[in-house]
Amino acid sequence: MWKSALKISFITIFALALGGWFGTWSRDMQSGNEAYRRGDYDAALAAFQQAVLQKPDNPIAHHNLGTALYQQGKFKAAAAAFQVSLLTGEQRAETYYNLGNAQFRAGELGKAIESYRHALRLTPTDADAKHNLQLALQLIQNQQKMSGQQKTGRRDTPVPKVSQSEARRLLEQLREKENSIRRKSLQRQFKSGYRREKDW
């Protein structure tokens, strides 16, 4: 009799503890989602961190943690959270897209391109992923052009064209400034008593 009563009480305590554990995780996720919707990303981050501690293998908790980190400008940490979400759960286009955005903002354009490509393999009609992929590819091209120009010392930026009268005016301003500097220099020399020998 005691053994069966002990088993029943053990099962009841275990079920209550397990229910409380799952209930806490759900409450943390719910409060994190509500805080996120309100724009209170600090509270959302704290709630999602608690949810991740309670269920470290839950991809949704990691995904939500990544979105809160992203909103706080912690792009590398957000990318890491999205990667864990992908490792612990199914390959979701939304997670790859968010991972690409975090990598893009962290300055990791090559990784962002790969993430956007993964997102497009899963959802080929995603216009945002296509746009961001094109933007990242364009930025990579621009960086390569700039680094190529710096290595060769070339500049493709055109020299602004100035009219002849504008050029004369600029030269005159330059001469006046140069003369002003010479006068000030000579005045300092005379005040200090130093006299330069004439060179003619």
Image (cartoon, grey):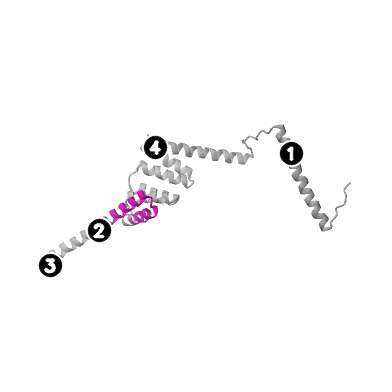
Mark 4 or 2 closer to N-term? 2
Tell me how far mark 1 sits from mark 2, CA to CA.
82 Å
Where is residue 75 drawn, in percent x and y? 44, 49
Q: Which quarter of the figure has residue 193?
A: bottom right
Give the answer, above or below, for where 123 lies relative to 45: above
Instruction: Residue 120: give its label.
Output: 4
User: Callout 4 environment at 10 Å: few (<14), some (14 to 19), or many (20+)?
Assistant: many
Residue carrying label 2: 20
Mark 1 or 3 closer to N-term? 3
Is 70 placed left or right of 22 in the picture? Answer: right
Mark 1 or 2 closer to N-term? 2
Name the one closer to the observer, 190 or 140: 190
Q: Nearer the viewer, mark 4 or mark 3?
A: 4
Residue located 44% across and 36% down the image: 131
Residue located 42% across and 42% down the image: 115
Instruction: Residue 171: give its label.
Output: 1
Residue carrying label 3: 2
Tell me how far mark 4 sits from mark 3, CA to CA.
61 Å
Name the one closer to the observer, 31 or 193: 193
Is 127 placed left or right of 17 in the picture? Answer: right
The secondary structure making up most of the magenta span is: helix
Where is residue 79 drawn, in percent x and y? 42, 48
Q: Which amino acid does label 4 sit on?
A: Leu
In the image, which residues are magenta?
23-50
* Secondary element at image label 2: helix
Mark 3 or 2 closer to N-term? 3
* Secondary element at image label 4: helix
